[in-house]
Amino acid sequence: MTGSTMRCCRKLAELLHTLVLAALLALSPVVQAAEIDLRGIQITPAEDGGLVLATDLAFDFSPRLEEAVGKGLTLHFVAEFELTRPRWYWFDERVIQIRQTWRLTYHALTRQYRLSTGALHQSFSSLDEALRSLSRIRNWQIAERDRLAPGETFDAGLRVRLDTSQLPKPFQVEALSNKDWILSSDWKRWSFTVPRVSAAVAPVMTTGEEAK
């Protein structure tokens, strides 16, 4: 079999797999996601003149997810943040759209759980400790210095979820019909005004009642 024929066969197999996955998604019943509750969202001026976000997460980690991590599966949690500028004459302008990913893994040799984001990571002796750290998002830079004009008002949105698209393919199929794999918050949306004060002044806070 020639190299070009092998490549064609691989592409055909990938296409077939994609079609099967799409068909399963279309035929699968709607699965209710377990909720992640976002609490006490805060946006504060950073020392470098930008803006950072903090929030606490409340969620139930299912036994199925706990088992999967314990067997060496990596789980990816994604936080998505956006700022949009309302425009009456056209679609709203998306000024900022960023995301941050945390990877939760278990290392059998060291018997430790690891929570990583980018090149940074922390190790924990128990899953509960790792989840407590995951539930506290702190100092996430959402805007650089001079990116936003002080006093300007935007529509803000925040969501946190388990990214099942990064699971191995067999688990992606299972997640289509098994609610234990679905863990997500709704979009929290609120009106945000860029502070005119320096970083030394009190933070701009978005409470749970304001963020809907």
Image (cartoon, rainbow, N blue to C red):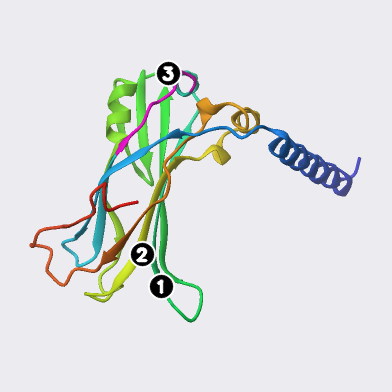
Instruction: Compare residues 207 and 13 and report the one nearer the observer.
Output: 207
Element type at mark 1: loop
| 27 in relation to 145, above or below | above
| 186 in relation to 31, above or below | below
Callout in the foreground (1, 3): 1
2 or 3: tag closer to the N-terminus? 3
Element type at mark 3: loop
Q: For the residue marked with disc 3, what is the amino acid?
A: Ala
Report which residue position mark 3 lands on. Answer: 108
1 or 2: tag closer to the N-terminus? 1
Disc 1 and disc 2 in contact, CB within 8 angstroms: yes
Image quarter where the N terminus lies is top right
Toward the right, the furthest residue is 1
Report which residue position mark 2 lands on. Answer: 155
Element type at mark 2: strand
Q: For the residue marked with disc 2, what is the amino acid?
A: Asp
The x and y percentages for residue 50 are: 24, 65
Q: State left or right for residue 57 relative to residue 8.
A: left
1 or 3: tag closer to the N-terminus? 1
Give the magenta range. 57-64
Instruction: Compare residues 193 and 77 and report the one nearer the observer.
Output: 193
The x and y percentages for residue 62 are: 44, 22
Label of residue 86 in the image: 1
The x and y percentages for residue 10 are: 80, 42
